[in-house]
Protein backbone atom coordinates (compact mmCIF):
# COMPACT_ATOMS: atom_id res chain seq x y z
CA UNK A 1 0.00 0.00 0.00
CA UNK A 2 1.30 3.42 -0.94
CA UNK A 3 1.34 5.98 1.86
CA UNK A 4 -0.03 9.37 0.82
CA UNK A 5 1.54 11.02 3.86
CA UNK A 6 4.55 10.04 5.98
CA UNK A 7 6.48 11.67 8.82
CA UNK A 8 10.19 11.97 9.44
CA UNK A 9 11.61 10.75 12.76
CA UNK A 10 11.87 14.41 13.87
CA UNK A 11 8.17 14.93 13.14
CA UNK A 12 7.19 11.76 15.04
CA UNK A 13 9.31 12.92 17.99
CA UNK A 14 7.54 16.30 18.03
CA UNK A 15 4.14 14.59 17.76
CA UNK A 16 5.01 12.44 20.79
CA UNK A 17 5.99 15.56 22.75
CA UNK A 18 2.68 17.21 21.84
CA UNK A 19 0.79 14.07 22.89
CA UNK A 20 2.47 14.18 26.29
CA UNK A 21 1.50 17.84 26.67
CA UNK A 22 -2.02 17.76 25.21
CA UNK A 23 -3.12 14.13 25.33
CA UNK A 24 -3.26 11.47 22.62
CA UNK A 25 -6.12 13.03 20.65
CA UNK A 26 -4.33 15.04 17.98
CA UNK A 27 -5.04 15.52 14.28
CA UNK A 28 -3.44 17.27 11.31
CA UNK A 29 -4.82 19.33 8.47
CA UNK A 30 -2.73 20.58 5.59
CA UNK A 31 -3.31 24.30 5.42
CA UNK A 32 -4.08 25.66 1.98
CA UNK A 33 -2.49 29.02 2.58
CA UNK A 34 -3.91 32.33 3.75
CA UNK A 35 -2.68 33.62 7.08
CA UNK A 36 -1.04 30.31 8.05
CA UNK A 37 0.78 29.74 4.75
CA UNK A 38 0.76 26.21 3.42
CA UNK A 39 1.71 24.07 6.39
CA UNK A 40 0.76 20.90 8.19
CA UNK A 41 -1.15 22.19 11.21
CA UNK A 42 -1.61 20.11 14.35
CA UNK A 43 -4.83 20.46 16.34
CA UNK A 44 -6.61 18.78 19.20
CA UNK A 45 -8.89 16.11 17.78
CA UNK A 46 -12.23 17.76 17.03
CA UNK A 47 -10.85 21.29 17.29
CA UNK A 48 -11.62 21.75 13.62
CA UNK A 49 -14.41 20.04 11.76
CA UNK A 50 -13.65 17.84 8.79
CA UNK A 51 -16.27 16.80 6.29
CA UNK A 52 -17.00 16.08 2.65
CA UNK A 53 -14.64 18.90 1.63
CA UNK A 54 -11.67 17.09 3.19
CA UNK A 55 -9.64 14.05 2.15
CA UNK A 56 -8.15 11.69 4.74
CA UNK A 57 -4.58 10.87 3.63
CA UNK A 58 -3.56 8.52 6.44
CA UNK A 59 -2.02 8.72 9.90
CA UNK A 60 1.30 10.14 11.04
CA UNK A 61 2.51 9.40 14.55
CA UNK A 62 -0.86 7.73 15.18
CA UNK A 63 -2.78 10.92 14.28
CA UNK A 64 -5.16 11.36 11.33
CA UNK A 65 -4.02 13.70 8.55
CA UNK A 66 -6.43 15.55 6.25
CA UNK A 67 -6.19 17.91 3.30
CA UNK A 68 -8.88 20.01 1.61
CA UNK A 69 -10.38 18.29 -1.44
CA UNK A 70 -9.58 21.17 -3.82
CA UNK A 71 -5.96 21.23 -2.67
CA UNK A 72 -5.74 17.42 -2.92
CA UNK A 73 -6.60 17.63 -6.62
CA UNK A 74 -3.34 19.53 -7.17
CA UNK A 75 -1.21 17.43 -4.80
CA UNK A 76 -2.61 13.93 -5.38
CA UNK A 77 0.39 12.92 -7.52
CA UNK A 78 2.77 13.56 -4.60
CA UNK A 79 3.54 11.96 -1.28
CA UNK A 80 3.49 14.49 1.54
CA UNK A 81 6.50 14.19 3.85
CA UNK A 82 5.98 15.95 7.16
CA UNK A 83 9.19 17.19 8.72
CA UNK A 84 10.18 19.71 11.40
CA UNK A 85 12.10 22.95 11.05
CA UNK A 86 13.30 25.42 13.66
CA UNK A 87 11.14 28.51 13.95
CA UNK A 88 7.69 29.61 14.93
CA UNK A 89 4.97 27.15 13.96
CA UNK A 90 1.70 28.14 12.42
CA UNK A 91 -0.50 30.60 14.23
CA UNK A 92 -3.07 27.89 14.88
CA UNK A 93 -0.82 24.84 15.21
CA UNK A 94 0.01 23.26 18.60
CA UNK A 95 3.78 23.15 18.06
CA UNK A 96 4.16 26.93 17.84
CA UNK A 97 5.30 27.45 21.46
CA UNK A 98 8.02 24.79 21.02
CA UNK A 99 10.07 26.97 18.65
CA UNK A 100 9.55 24.40 15.92
CA UNK A 101 7.22 24.12 12.96
CA UNK A 102 5.87 21.19 11.01
CA UNK A 103 7.05 21.55 7.43
CA UNK A 104 5.58 19.82 4.40
CA UNK A 105 7.89 18.45 1.74
CA UNK A 106 6.79 16.26 -1.12
CA UNK A 107 7.97 13.82 -3.72
CA UNK A 108 6.27 12.80 -6.95
CA UNK A 109 4.88 9.27 -6.98
CA UNK A 110 6.33 6.97 -9.63
CA UNK A 111 4.08 5.36 -12.26
CA UNK A 112 3.59 2.12 -10.32
CA UNK A 113 2.62 4.03 -7.17
CA UNK A 114 0.16 6.20 -9.12
CA UNK A 115 -1.43 3.08 -10.64
CA UNK A 116 -1.78 1.54 -7.17
CA UNK A 117 -3.32 4.75 -5.80
CA UNK A 118 -5.76 4.93 -8.72
CA UNK A 119 -6.80 1.32 -8.02
CA UNK A 120 -7.28 2.08 -4.31
CA UNK A 121 -9.46 5.10 -5.07
CA UNK A 122 -11.71 3.20 -7.49
CA UNK A 123 -11.98 0.00 -5.41
CA UNK A 124 -15.52 -0.03 -3.87
CA UNK A 125 -14.36 -2.08 -0.85
Image (cartoon, rainbow, N blue to C red):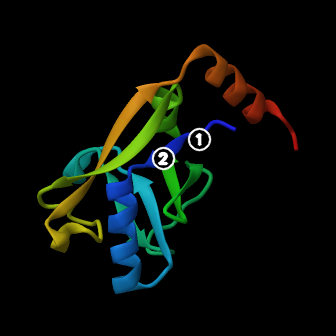
Q: Secondary structure at mark 1?
A: loop
Along the viewing direction, whichever of 26 and 49 lies nearer the viewer: 26
Question: Is residue 29 placed above or below 4 in the rendered structure?
Answer: below
Q: Position of residue 92 (x, y in %)?
A: 27, 66
Q: Secondary structure at mark 2?
A: strand
Q: Residue furthest front?
A: 9
Q: Position of residue 119 (x, y in %)?
A: 77, 27
The disc placed on residue 116 is none
Task: Give how far apart the Cα atoms at labels 1 and 2 are.
Answer: 7 Å
Residue 115 picture quarter: top right
Label 1 neighbourhood size at 10 Å, few (<14), some (14-19), many (20+)? few
Question: Is residue 89 placed above or below 25 in the rendered structure?
Answer: above
Q: Residue at x 63, y 22 (%)?
A: 114
Q: Residue at x 48, y 46 (%)?
A: 6
- Circle 2 residue: 6
Q: Residue at x 40, y 72 (%)?
A: 16
Q: Is residue 55 left or right of residue 105?
A: right
Quarter of the picture holding the C terminus: top right
- Circle 1 residue: 3
Q: Residue at x 35, y 50 (%)?
A: 31
Q: Position of residue 97 (x, y in %)?
A: 17, 74
Q: Are marks 1 and 2 in contact (CB under 8 Å)?
A: yes
Question: Is residue 6 placed above or below 1 in the rendered structure?
Answer: below
Label 2 neighbourhood size at 10 Å, few (<14), some (14-19), many (20+)? many
Amino acid sequence: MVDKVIATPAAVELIELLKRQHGPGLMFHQSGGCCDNSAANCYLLGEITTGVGDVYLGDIGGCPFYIGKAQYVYWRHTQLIIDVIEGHGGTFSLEGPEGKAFHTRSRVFNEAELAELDAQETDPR
